[in-house]
Structures are given as C-alpha cells and as structure tokens.
Image (cartoon, coloured by chain):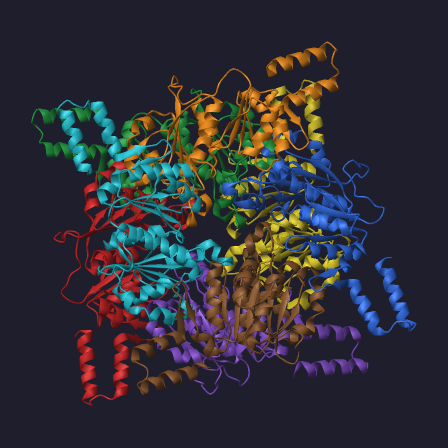
Chain colours: A blue, B yellow, C brown, D purple, E cyan, F orange, G red, H green
C-alpha cells in the first residue's frame, strides 16, 4: 500500500466521520515518522522518493538496530544497514529472517518483496555506475558503494586494483570508463586515482578517500586533501571511507 | 572545422602523398595539444566533449594568461578564465576584444560564436541547476559556480542569503529547491546549509565550503569538515571556494 | 549541620579556650577542603553554592574514586560521579550503598537525603532545560547533560533524534523548543543542529559536539568547529562529549 | 506600528476584499524578511524578540552594508553592525546620520528612538554582566562584547588587564566578580583566565578566546583549546575574537 | 675505579709495552660506550657528570632492557629506567635483584651502592624542587618527575591536586611555593596551572603538560599549547607526559 | 623463460596460424599483469627492471596474500612481502615452503632460485648502502630498509643507536659514513640525525622518520617535519616508518 | 625609595593618625599596581624580585606603550619593552629620552640609574649564559634573549651560525659551551641544534624555536615539535620566537 | 690555489719557523670556515666536494647577503644564492659584477672562472636529470631545481605542464622519462604526478610539492602528504617549494 493510498484512506475516514480528527492526526504524523524514543524513524522521505531506508549501525546498540530494522521492514520493500558488525547481523537475522549479510562491506540488506538487488551480471541497463578501486585494501569501501547503488536499483560495474603506479592496468579499462554514466573512484594512500580517471572521462567522478595507508596518511587525511585539490575537472568528494555516501550520490545521478 | 574534419584532411593528404609523414605527425599531435613551453594547451578534451576550455589564472603571469587565451580562442567557440584579477582582464581585453569580465566571481568568458551564455532569465529549459548561498559574503563563490555552468550551457537559478539561522527564508523556496535537477549549496562559517538542503530534496547536492568566517573557521576548514560529515544523504563536496568545480560538476550531471 | 553552624561551633570553642588556635586552624581549613594526599577535596564551594559535588572518574583508580566519594557523601546531600565505568560502580556500591548507576551516561549519583532527583515527568516547574540530540548515537552524551541538570535540581525535557537531515521531526517540536528557558543541543558528525535550533528560538543554546562520526569528523573536531562558527546568535559551546559541562552550565542559567 | 498591527491591517483588508490575496501574500512575506537579491533581511525575529538587528560587515561591500542598514533602520529602533572598518563607517554615516562609531571594537550602532545605550555608569540595575579581560591587547574584543550587551539593554561592568600572571589584580575584584549575574572572560595567549574566574564564582562564565599572542598561539587556537578544556565548572566558549557572540549570549541570560 | 684511574692504567700499560696499541684503542673506546649491536651504551657522559644513567623502555623488548640494565649496573652506582611496564620489571628483577619498582610512575631504579635515593622526608637540604600537580590523574607524571630528581640526588617536595578551579588550595601553599629553588608544575586539560604558579613565584617553573583530558584536549595538545603561551615570565616547557625530562632539568638547576 | 622468449613464442604462433589472435591477445595481456579480481598482479615492471616484486600485506586478508605470493613466485625469482604479521607468515609458509620470515622488520622473502640475498658480511662490493639508526626502538624500520635493499641485491652496512645526543658514537663511524655510496638514516622523536649525517657526508641521504616517541611526537609527525626542514643539503624524505621505501630508493641509486 | 621604605612611611603615618585608613589603603594598593583603565601596571613583583619590568608592545597602541613606560620608569630603575616597531620607539623617545633602541631584536631598554646593561665584553663574572644560534636569520630572536638577560644583569656570551649541518663550527666552541652555567639555543627549520648541544653539555639548555624556514616548517611548528621531542636530557622549550622568555628564564637560573 | 696547496704552504712555513704556531692555527681554522660574527662561512665542505657554495637569502639583510657572497666568491669558482628578491640582486651586482640573476626561480649565480653553467641544449652528456612540472604555476620551483643542478654541473632536461588530468601529454614524453638517470617531479594541488611518473620509470624520482593551489591545499600540505604516501616505489620527497634541495639531491645521484 503506497503512501498516497494510505493518505486517501485516512482522509476518507475523517470525512465520513469514521475516524476522529485526533486519531487521524496521530496516524498522519506516524506516516511521516515513527517515534521510538531513542530514534525517530523517518518513513516519509523514502516512501516519497522510492529509495530504500538506511540505518547507520555505529554507535547504536544491537537492540536498537534490530528494533529500527523491524519497523522499517514493516513499511518499506527495501532496507539497508551499513557498518554492521557480524554480531549485529547475528542479532538481526533472528528477528528479520530475510536479512542478507554482505561480509566485505559489512552491510545488511533486506528485500521484502520480489524486486532483487541488481547484480553486475545484469547488463541489460545501458546506464551504469562504474566503481573503480586503487588497491586491494580499498575493496571493502568500494563494495559498500557498489552494494548501496545496486540495492537502490542501479547497474554497477567494478574495476579493482588499478592504482596509478601501474597505469597500464587502468588504461586497459578505458572503454569501460568512458561508457559509464557516473564513476566512483576509491583510493587510499596518496589518493591520486580520481584525478587520473577524471582526466580520462567527461563524466561525473565521485572520489572516495579511504583510511588505507600508514604514517603521514593520517587515517585518510592525505587522500582526502589530495582529492579535494584534484586538478581534474568534474570531481567531487565524500567523507573518508564513505562508500555508502558515494553509492547513494551516484544513484541519484544515474537513475 | 571539427576535429573529425581536420583528421580526415590530414590523413587524406598523407595517403595522397601531399603531406610527408613527419608533418602529419606534428599536426596530429598539435590537434591534441599545443606546446607553448610554459604550458601545454589541451585542445583534445574540450573539442571531443564540447566543453569550453578553462584557464586558472592564479600563479600565471598576465602575459601567460593572454597567450593561452589567444591560442584557445583560435580553436574553441567558448573559453573561460577563473580567478582573474582586474589587471589580468585589462591585459586580456587588449588582445581578445570579445572577452567579457564578470566582476563578482572575477571570471573572464569569451564567446567567439553566436551561442550566448544562458541567463537565469532563460527559463525554457525544464532542467536547471539551483545555486543556493548561505550568506551575502558567499556570493562571489556562488557566482563562480553559476557563471561556469551557464557558460557551459546549463540553465541556472539562484537563491541567495538563506542561511540556516533563518530557516523560513529557505523553506519559502521549497518549490524551487525540489524542481531543480541538481543543487549547488555554497556556505562558509559552520557550513550547515548543505545538510539542511540535502534533507529537503532527493537530488544530488554539491556542497561548496567558502573561506568566509573568522577565528576557528580556519579559512574554510570548519565548513569543509562540516560538509564532508553531512548526515544528509546525497551530498558531495568540492574544495574550499571552488565555485568553478561545483559549476562544472553540476553541468556534467545536468546536461 | 551546615557550614555556618560548624563555623560557629569552632569559633565559640576558641573564644572559650576549649579549642587551641592550632586545632581550630586545622579544622577551619578542613572545612574548606580535605587533603587525601592524592586529592584535595573541595567542600567549600558546593556547600556555599548548594550544588552537588562532582567527581570525574577517568584517570583515577577505583580505590581513589571510592575514597573521594565516601568523604563527599559524609558532608554533602547530593554527590555525582561522571565517566564511571561499570567496574568503578561495582567498587563504589559496596561502600556507598545509596549509590545509583545511570548506564547510558555512565554516571553515579548519590542522594543521601530525601530530596530526589527530578524526573522529566515532574512538570510542575515552568522553567525547564530542553536537551535536544541529533542522533541516536548522541544519546549517552545527551543523557549525561540531562542527568547532571536533574541531579542539580532543574526540570529537564528531552527531544532526541531530530537531526537536520529530517527537518520536519525538529519543526514538529517547535512549541517545546520555544517554551524552554535554556536549550542544550547535542550533535556529532557535522554538528549543524545548534545553528538551526539557535535560529528558531531566542533563548541561550548550549552546543555539545560529540565524537560520533568517522573519517573527517576527526573524533568530534568537525562538530566542534561547526558549532564554534555557528551563524546563529546565542550559541555557546562546551568540549567534545562534555554533557556534564553543558548540564551544569544550563542549570546555572535555569535556577 | 508593531508587527501585530500590520498583520491585523493586512488581514482585515483581505477579508473586506480591499486587498487581493496575491498582494497580501507578498506583504506578509515581506513582514518576515525583505529580499534585496544579495541579502534577505530578516525582520521577523528581532521584531518578535525585541532584539536589535545585527549586520556582520566582513565580506560585504560598503554599498551592501549601507543598503542593509538603511532597510533595517526603517523598521527597527536599534541596529548594530560589527567588524566595520572606518571606511565602512564613512559610507554609512552619509546615509544614516544617526549612526555612531565605536572605534575600539569597530562597531556601528544606530538608536533611532529615544532609548539610549546603557552605560556602565548606569548602575541602577542590580543585574549586570561583567566583562573581564586578561590583557590590554584583548580590549577590542572585550569592548565588542560590552557594547553589544549594552546596546541590547543590559548593564555592563568592565574589569580589564587582570591576567593570571598577576593574580592579586584579579582577587582585588572579587566582590565585583561575585555580584555579577553572568561573566564574559576575554583572554588570548594561554587563555587561562576563564578557568580561574570560573573557580571563583558560581555564575555562568562565557569564555572568549582572542587571537592575541604569537608563535604557538596559532592565531587563538591555544586559547580556544584551553577554554574548551577548562577544569572549572560553568564555562562555555564562543569563537575566537567573537566578542559580539559573547555579549549577545550574556544578554540572553541576563535579561 | 674511576674513569681517570682506568685511563691511567691503560696508558701506562701502553707506554710500558705491556698492552698493544690496538688493544688499548679498543679498551679506550669501550670506556666511552659499549656496543651491543642493538644499542651503544654511553658510559662516558654519566661517569663524567656523576649522573645516573637512564633507559627509556618503550619500543625496546624486555630482553633488550635487561641486557642494557645489566651492563649499566656493572659500571654505575645509580641506574634508572622509565616507562617500564610491570612485565618488564618482572624480567629485570630476575637478573638485577637490587632493582626497585615505582608503581605509580612505572619506573625502575637500581642503587648499587650505599647512597640512597633521597626521600621528601629528608629535609636537611635547604634547596629543594617542588613538584605541583593540578589533578589526581596527573600524579603518575608528577611522580616520574619527583622520583627522577630524587634518584639524581635532589630533595623533592610535593603538592598535589591544586588545580586552578579551586585557587584557595594553591594559595594555601604559597610559602612552600616561594621557598622552592625550582618548581615543576604538572597539568592536563587546559594546562593553566604553570601560568598561575609562575605569577606567584620568581623562580624557574618547568611546565609539564599531561595527556589527561578528553575531546579537544587532543591527548595533551591543549595543555602543551597553553603552557607554551604562558603569559607568566619564567616558564619553560617539556614534552607531554615527560615527567622524567622535567625532573632531570630541575635537578640540573637545583644541584 | 624470459619475457622476450615468451613474446617471441606467442608472436611466432600467431604468424604460423597455430594460435588465434584472441588467445594471443589474452596471453600478451597476462604477460603484463594477472587479474585475480581482488588484485591485478603487475608482472611486467619487475620482469623488465629485474627487481623483485613486493606485496604490502596490511589491509589484505591472509588468503589474499597467499594467493598473490603464489602467483608471483611462479614467475619471479625473488619476491618480498612487507608488514606481514606472524600469522600471515604461518599461512604463507604452508603454501610457499621457501618463504623466509624476518622477525624484526616483519618481512617475508622468497628466493626461488640460487641467487641469495646479500648479507652485510658479503663485503666484496665496494658500493654499499649504509643504514644508520638513531635509537634501539628504530631498528625494526631500519631493518625493513636493510632487508629490502639486500633482497634487491645491494650490499648493506648497518650502524645502529647513534642518536645525536651522544655525538661521539656517530663521529666514531665517520669513515664508514664517508665510504658509503648512499645512506639511509632512520630516526624517531626529534628526527635530527639526518641533518647531522647530511652535514658530515656529500652523498645522498634518505631520511626515514619513525613513529617512535610520545606526546608531541604525534606518531612521527615531529620527526617527519624535522627531516623535511633539514638545513643539510642532500636529504630527501620518505613516509613515516617506510623502511621499505627507503631501501628501494637507495637500491635504485646504488645499483 | 624602596618599597620597604614606602611601606614604613605609610604605616607610620597611619599609626600617628596623620593618614586616614582609606588613604592608606589606596596608597598601599597603588604600591602593588597602578590602574590606567586599559592596563593595570604591576609594580609589586618587580620591586620585590629586583627584576626590570617588561612591556610586550604587540597589540598595544603607541600611546598605550608610551603611557605604560612612563609610569614604569617613574618607579623602576630598569624597564624593557619587547616587539617594539621603530615607529613605537619614535613615540617613546619623545617622552622617555633615556630610552635606548636595539634594532635587531626590536627592543627598548631604559636604564634610569647608573647601573649599566652588562655587555658580553664584561667578562669578570664567571657565571654566564651562552646564547647559541643555528643560522644568521635566527639572530634577531637570539639577540632578544641576550639583551633581556643582560638587561636583567647576567653576563651573556654569544655563538652564532653554528647549525648542525656544519658540526665542526659547533665543536670548535666546545670549551665555551661547557663553561656556561646555562645555555639558550635558538634554531628554526628542523630545530635540531638543542639536541646536539644538549648531548655535549650537562647544563640546562633552553631551546627557542624560531619561525625561520618555509613550507613544512609551518611558521616554526617543525622546530617546536623537534625541540619538545629532544632525545637529549636537560632540554626545556619556550614559545616560537620567544627570545625574551628564554632570556628571562636563563637569568632566573643564572643569578 | 687548492686547499691542499694551501695546507702545504702553511705547514711548510711552520716547520721552517717562518710562521708562528698561533698564526698557523688561525689560518688553518679559516681554511675551514670564516667567522663574520653574524655568519660562519663554511669553505671546507664545498672545497672538498667540489660543489658550489649556496646562500639562502630569506631572513638575511641585503648587506649580509652581499658580504657573504663576496667572501665566497673570493675562494670558490661557483657560488649560488637562492630566494633572492630582485632588490637583493640589485645590491649584489654592485659589488659582484659577475653575478647573474635568474628571474623565474629568483636565484643568483656567480661563475668566477671559465666553466659555464650547463644548458639543456648541451646534450653531449648521456646522463641527465629530467625536471617535470605538473602546471605552469609550478615552473618557478621547477626552475630552481633545474638551475641548481645545472650550476652544479649536471645536464638537465625539462618537461613542463604535464599534469595528471591530461595524461596523454605526459605519455607522449615517455622516452624522455625512461632515458633520464634521475627525475625531479614538481607538482602543487593534489601532487599526484610523482606517483604516476614513479609508476612509469624505474629510476629514482624526487618529488617536490609546491604551494600552488588554494583552499584545502593548505599552502602545499595536500601535495606534500600525497607525495609522502605515494604508492609508487622509488619516490622520495623534499620540503614544499624546495626546488633547490631537489636539484642538489638529484645532482648527488647523477654525477
């Protein structure tokens, strides 16, 4: 039942006198968000935009995550949770059996209905997001971006371990780079890959710095600054290790 | 004459023996970029993508800027220069009479041919970029974004001085916010505006921190960090005061 | 027995010759503070101002905390300890049976006499402090502020999980915001909430940055800088995660 | 004419059919703020709260400052402008003859009506704000705080040059410290004064770090961090050199 | 046997032909330092100056610490080791039975000969070093300073938990402060104590910032910057938590 | 079989029609790098330059490290892995029996063929790299540099624990310093050693800051900045704790 | 007339009834400090300790400096002003004819009485402070230290331009280094000199980082961190460019 | 006259009794360095190594620069001065007529004898240093490197304006890159070029970050961190804008 249907039903009941105004107010408000005390679950936005609802697990207790996910699954066909430790998933799947765990990006996705997460193998969609990673250690962040965009409904292609120190590995993928509608480029250490990719294509490049590195990488600061100062045109940046944000932003462009 | 025509001509001349291979090599290379010694002007990319070519004036002498602009104008219908001090413009307009100066964003644009820069008043295009600024002092950066996107061919709308401390000014513009295809949000000081705007729309938001502020704003660092940590989904960030980068990125999405 | 009574008694004894001057000096000094070697417990200030005495547990051994609390409870009707790990509480309650543990903010409170800590349900006081938190993960810091102010004697109301990315959740609480005498606004990540709240009310807003976030939040630095640069008038800031400081400061204004 | 009167008039005209709905909409909106293009002047808030309206001059052209001040003075009895260079004042006073310039804090105040700015000599009000400065070089920031609070209507007392290296100068003022309702403590360099003052009184202390210092003061960072980490209870902090913010916040507590 | 005696013996043997030049060279060099491969133990300096030799344990394996201490004890009457974890001490005392462990500052001292470490109770020496600490949590660093100076032979007095938020606790000790020849002031958080102490005495004050604090204390950075910017004359600073350095420096002045 | 031989074979097969073009393309590409999905192993560069191939283990799972090492060992006579935890080595040696573990620098080296890693004892080569370390705690980084250069084929000499506070230990080694072709100088804390060494020799000095230190060393930042600002000519710097990078760079100069 | 004499006179007058108590209170207070409104001049401390009084000119107007100096000179035989621009001196000497300007350290000294500032040529005092500078550009800071200590009455010797990159220049001065009672070592860039000097002597070394350098020296931060992390024992640090603080501290030790 | 000749002469004179020992000592010492009071000119090192002597002009008065250059030119065939403002050169050339000014890198070189600075056109030397710059604004720093190495006697080739955003401009120069013996790569903004170049060649790459950029480049910090974290092997880094250091280091490798 869509939000519009619900609205119709409530308002009709009010007009017909079947539902008192106070009750209608209460239900309309809960259409918009649900108040659990420790959290106010925002149903409105995702219903309107057709996006899955997302839970950021860090800083929440497993009990809080489970409670929020249950409420969301009751209303939304697709729900995601990011930064979910394996223990959190253990708690979740007892209560939400359809929950699926993605180990590398540590994400939980729940598809209540028939629509499946797109896989990279689903190549019927001409428009796709290309996720590029500089090194093997950047893959968890890259996968967070990829799984996010796929769960939202975008086709995603992946090109991993093509750091700038071995340029031929990247140049070999030039066709794939040029055919993408939007690119996500994930890199730690010196974070130079988005500049190089940005110079090769004329599509939006979303740069994701990672905390991969040591010493003067200062937990991803070096890569972040590098990407913010990119001399290539058409590059924008998200927070360090924020694969989710990049996947979400890319889907907004791609859909 | 397009790049394809030029290529055809050169290759035909080689086949017919009219042009020696060495000369052809030289001309083909210069199709791609022109070497001035202090600069290698990249003609290839903009010709291919149909984008105007851009010169960043800081750190270049007026003579260098003039020389580069002259070469670019010889081949490209539209050319831009950013961060151009009034003195630089004085030097430029003596040699490039069609050059136009935008005082607030300190930009030079040259439109060699008929196509004009779009104005916000040109509202026939349903797809537009909305440039939002938090304060009056952020307007020069906002205008750099707006003029860049307009010069590239996008319709741009502006909403200025709607900082988060007076939320009703922003909420009054909700229709304009929702109807935009992509938004550029420019803010200094605490840089909170992109998070608020990002929560109101489900379109890509490009956040531009500015160096407006004092004390612990640390020349825009506070706004930059704020924007990178935005709790709103769908926000990506460019460098401090980088209106040009935001305008360019927005146009890539909007076209 | 109040400080004034004690003073009277000592001075009378001196005058009557019952107490030698040296002993009186010693006792008068200990009225003011008690020297445990590793700590000089300051009795004077809280007796004078009627505030509970507070122990910051970090960096102290459980034995030191127990010893200090015992001395304080011997003289003060209300005592608090902040940043108390569960193990510390275990040690404390063996020696101080009236000690109560608040799990979420990890605080210990001891009410020796009849006066109870106010609860939010105690709504007879027109003047109240409103504690607002941006996200679920900020609640431990928000609760430290709330429990501190309640233990000191203020009425406290709570509004949690109303971050700026879902503005309607906050605007729904506008009446509660406007009726408060002073507000404490707790937020991590980009720390934008105090600016938005500060723009909605004309009361003092105490902003508390939290270390909630990742990457370029730099353990709360982003939120801290954001709040210091707030464009809203009437905002002052305390240290990262310093819920106690905010609660104390708010009570000073509210009483 | 108050805002309520205006509202009454407009709504009456609509009901009587004298004013079309569109015109009423337009006028109601402008009651709230006025749109100059480069600025949206917020009349609503100050009218409602009875506070003077404030213009931050940095980053605005003199023409913009003059235009905004003229609009504000047309509706508000008291208007302030901060960080106004002498040149800006020169432009202002040609158009706003009642404008008064405070040289030390570089502020402009305009009192359109009879109510005068309180002076420290006006000692009839028992409640006062005490502004304390550590050094002579901190006085411009201290004066910004003092003039702000006075312009808003608070009684202000001043104690200057009582830095912690000469404690007796401060302790001599203990009575004045204790009698204040709220204190503003301004210090650069190591910023230790608010901790010492906070330990002497049981009133709210607003700490203002200044950029006074050199070397490892890093333009006020040392003082800022010092104040945020104050071991004294009851201290909150505003931005470096933000005398205005401290004065405003203090007045909110004091009124 | 002193270094001079050894030199005499070696050189006499060379002159008399009893010792070949190569052997003499080897022995002379080892007089100066001993090469263990992983460490070059410097005997020369401490023999000459009469100071105990010091081993910094962090970053060394327990085996390395034991080996170095054994070599040092073979030649020096007094040896110290700082930052020694309890496990390191366990390894040490098996091989160096005279080793004594100081739990609070985590130091090992070895007094091979009769001369004992001075205790604070040894008050026959008019010249003494006063170690002052701001809080209870600063005591481990303060004790590192105190034990270092005592082991080197200075009389040390202690005044702990006299932070600036309760000034009367400090002022009560004014006589002790004024009578000291040199003062070590240890403080975390805002690090204001050295400025206040520096203003009360006209003796050299060695300021030791500690990592005690949280949030914007940034592991002692706030206290460090505060102390470097001290407005009091006669204050110099050592590294964060460097009690040893302060104790050593103070002894150089005091002896 | 060398790369040239392989190329010859493939191309001959294509010409003779024995190998289809597609297969040849595939094999040629894999000559250059091998795609494992999570990694693209770059064979080309090391084959061409004769260098061992290197695996950085941090951020890779043990399974990934094992897989990459097996592929590399199948084609390269010498393979190295850096930052390998003992557990990683346990996994590796089960599959790669020739793997050798260097405990101090936590490296794995595999020499498939007869050529052995040079030892410092192999002193037939006049050209050598000298690795100098300031303290005992810097040795793991120094050994990473030394083992890297030795594995690549350079003669390496070592001088350890010659920090600037005991200059005579360093000056004693002056001949060894002057005879080296290139020097690697490893130091934590204040990082002063490269400046002093750089002043003693007229050879390239590669400075390696280490994270050895505490407090204001900020995990090696102090040493890094110190080395970047060296007043001695002929000093270049690598990342904090990057012994591998220094060893590699030194070998490029030395060979 | 000394402070003791003044006290005697005042108290005698009170006892004899010649001076009312109120007047005595007033005069006694002004013995201690004088209140100019913008400054509270502290006479007490310097009179008691026999030190010259010091004015830090930065952030004060020339008028304020002149006024303060005149008051000080009326009571103190020796007065200093630091960071005095030539223009400030011009204002000063009109009102204080005995004022002497030191161009290199930009200091003003006033010797009202016969006692002259010691010169380095005055070598009758066995105890001296040695000021060592690393480079020519560090001399202004070194001179601030030297002139300060000389004005306070210490003998000062100078050794300039002996940076660590040319160690023989320093080692040539070893006798002078060893004979000093306390050393001030001034260095910019990598700030390594105090560690080297600290290793050569067993006297207190006061390290002064300077802002000399560029790039990653970050205005003296590199030198500051270097000095704080000195591996040499017996080194303490003052603020960047704080020659005055070093000279003052050294005199406290030396006298 | 070489140093050896001078030594011979002096020692002969001593043996023959013509020169007293004291005078010989004096002259021998001045062979090594000359003491001007404000500077100790180091003649020894450059004479021994055959390198030109270098003066860093920043922080020195024009008079000091002139004096030092005159002394150096009296003994050395080649002398350089870096960071010389045009005014400094004006002062120099009056006293040192052979001085030549390089405007772009702001350097002075003096060739007293016949040997000329090599020019890039001098291509007889197979070994050369290649200086690569990312952008036009980086050229002053690149030229400082090039002129330094040329003045020392190396052949230098230049490739300018080949930033990573237009990779084909760089790849076109691949032969030149591969044939160089050592490469200097100069880049501002994100500083990605050294990583890309390092991946293309197997020669030492000296990376020079420049302060070119704005906003989050933080005066070259972004480029510096980027280069320190280079994922390419064989990259070492010098200070921001330190073209001189790179040129010197490259010459040490190249000669």
Residue G246 in the image: above or below residue G88? above
Query: Which is nearer the eye, C239 or F234?
Result: C239
Residue F124 place in picture, x, y as percent: 38, 16
Taking A195 as reference, is D244 left or right? left
Q: Position of residue D239 (x, y in %)?
A: 50, 64
Q: Residue at the far right: name it.
A: A16
**Which residue is pictured at 13% across the width and 65% down the height?**
G114
Up the image or down, H76 lies above or below C32; here it is above
Query: Where the N terminus of chain F falls, by quadrant?
Result: top right
Indicate left or right for A26 with C105 as reference: right
Q: Which one is in front, E74 or F4?
A: E74
Q: Position of residue A174 (x, y in %)?
A: 68, 32
Q: Is residue A89 left or right of residue D163?
A: right
Q: Can residue B115 be seen? A: no
Q: Nearer the viewer, residue F203 or E137?
A: E137
How many marks the image carries: the answer is 0
Q: Quadrant of the C terminus of chain F?
A: top left
Instruction: Point out the residue furthest to the bottom here.
Output: G17
Hey, which residue is sitting farthest top in the picture? F16
- When asked about the image quadrant of residue C114, the answer is bottom right
x and y percentages locating residue F87 in the rendered image: 57, 34
> Which residue is at a point 27% across and 78% down the rendered structure image?
G30
Give A235 or B9, whichever is nearer the viewer.
A235
Residue D215, placed above or below residue G230: below
Can residue G200 be seen from the camera position used here? yes
On screen, residue E153 versus residue H231, left or right, reads left
């Amino acid at each position: 039942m869509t939000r519009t249907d619900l609205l119709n039903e409530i308002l009709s009941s009010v007009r017909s006198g079947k539902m008192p105004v106070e009750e209608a107010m209460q239900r309309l408000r809960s259409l918009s968000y649900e108040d659990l005390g420790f959290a106010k679950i925002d149903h409105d936005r995702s219903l309107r935009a057709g996006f899955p609802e997302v839970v950021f697990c860090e800083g929440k207790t497993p009990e809080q995550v489970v409670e929020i996910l249950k409420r969301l699954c009751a209303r939304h066909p697709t729900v995601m949770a990011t930064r979910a430790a394996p223990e959190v998933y253990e708690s979740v799947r007892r209560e939400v059996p359809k929950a699926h765990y993605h180990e590398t990006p540590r994400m939980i996705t729940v598809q209540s209905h028939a629509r499946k997460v797109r896989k990279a193998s689903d190549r019927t969609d001409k428009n796709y997001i290309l996720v590029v990673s500089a090194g093997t250690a950047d893959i968890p962040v890259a996968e967070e971006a990829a799984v996010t965009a796929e769960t939202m409904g975008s086709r995603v292609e992946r090109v991993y371990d093509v750091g700038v120190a071995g340029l031929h590995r990247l140049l070999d993928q030039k066709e794939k780079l040029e055919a993408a509608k939007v690119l996500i480029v994930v890199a730690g250490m010196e974070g130079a890959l988005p500049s190089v990719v940005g110079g090769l294509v004329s599509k939006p490049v979303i740069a994701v710095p990672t905390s991969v590195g040591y010493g003067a990488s200062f937990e991803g600061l070096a890569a972040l600054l590098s990407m913010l100062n990119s001399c290539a045109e058409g590059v924008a940046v998200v927070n360090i290790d924020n694969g989710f944000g990049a996947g979400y932003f890319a889907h907004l462009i791609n859909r």
